Image (cartoon, rainbow, N blue to C red):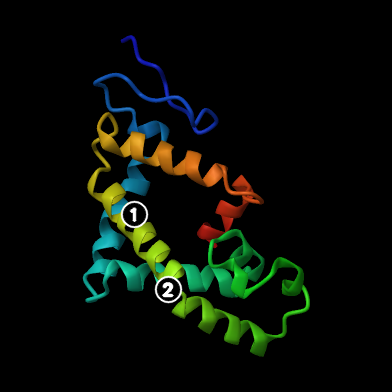
Amino acid sequence: MGCIQTTRTKPEATARCSADISHLWVTVRQRQLIRTTWPRIVSCDADFEQIGVEVFLRIFSRHPELISLFPFGDVCPADQVAEMKPEKLAATLDQVRQHPTFRNHAAAFASAIGMAVESLDDWDGDLTATLLQLGRMHSETQGFTVQNLSVCSE
């Protein structure tokens, strides 16, 4: 068909064909799960900022070492994470929660998820380009690794 196939190992590639290539990224079952769970999350009168805040705070409570990768990471220097006691972590997460840059990032994150959910069937449109751009931006973050993304599935 003259397509450039997009795979998970070649994030710089883009799809350029009219065929549905979403099966390379998201299975039918995964799409069903996304379509049934996302509306439940956004229908709880939660705005995107609130959703993003809760997601990131859950990640940071399990992996506080990731806080330092973000622009608001100055509230928790990486060298202090190893010795952090539970009460210090709670105080740090409170500081993170109040940080305006964190709140903006959380809202942007949840908004991007919402856009991706709405565009699940539009892989030839803006979805692929947007996700690839987000991936490029995040890959330029010093200290960020692909393994950091695995915490999102916990």
Please, what secondary structure does the residue beneath circle 1 have? helix
Left/right placement of residue 110 relative to residue 55 reads left
Pick the quarter of the image with the C terminus. bottom right
Q: Is residue 149 visible?
A: yes
As displayed, is residue 62 above or below residue 122? below
Q: Which residue is mark 1?
A: 113
**For this view, does 11 lie left or right of residue 145?**
left
Task: Please indicate whether residue 127 sits to the left or right of residue 72 in the image.
Answer: left
The reply to whether dot 1 and dot 2 touch (C-beta < 8 Å) is no
Instruction: Residue 36: give its label.
Output: none
Q: Residue 127: which quarter of the image?
A: top left
Is residue 13 depicted above or below 154 in this figure? above
59 horizontally vs 102: left or right: right
Residue at (71% x, 66% y) in the render: 78
Residue 19 in the image: x percent, y percent?
26, 22
The answer to which of marks 1 and 2 sits earlier in the sequence is: 2
Label 1 crowd (10 A; few <14 / some 14-19 / many >=20): some
Percent position of residue 39, x then y: 24, 63
In the foreground, 66 or 27? 66
Circle 2 residue: 54
- Counting from the top left corner in percent of width and height, residue 6 is at 43, 26
Q: Amino acid at mark 2?
A: Glu
Q: Residues within 10 Å of mark 2 (few under 14, many from 20)?
A: some
Quarter holding the N terminus is top left
Which residue is nearer to you in this view: 59 or 80? Answer: 80
> Marks 1 and 2, Cα distance to the nearest angstrom?
14 Å
Q: Amino acid at mark 1?
A: Ile
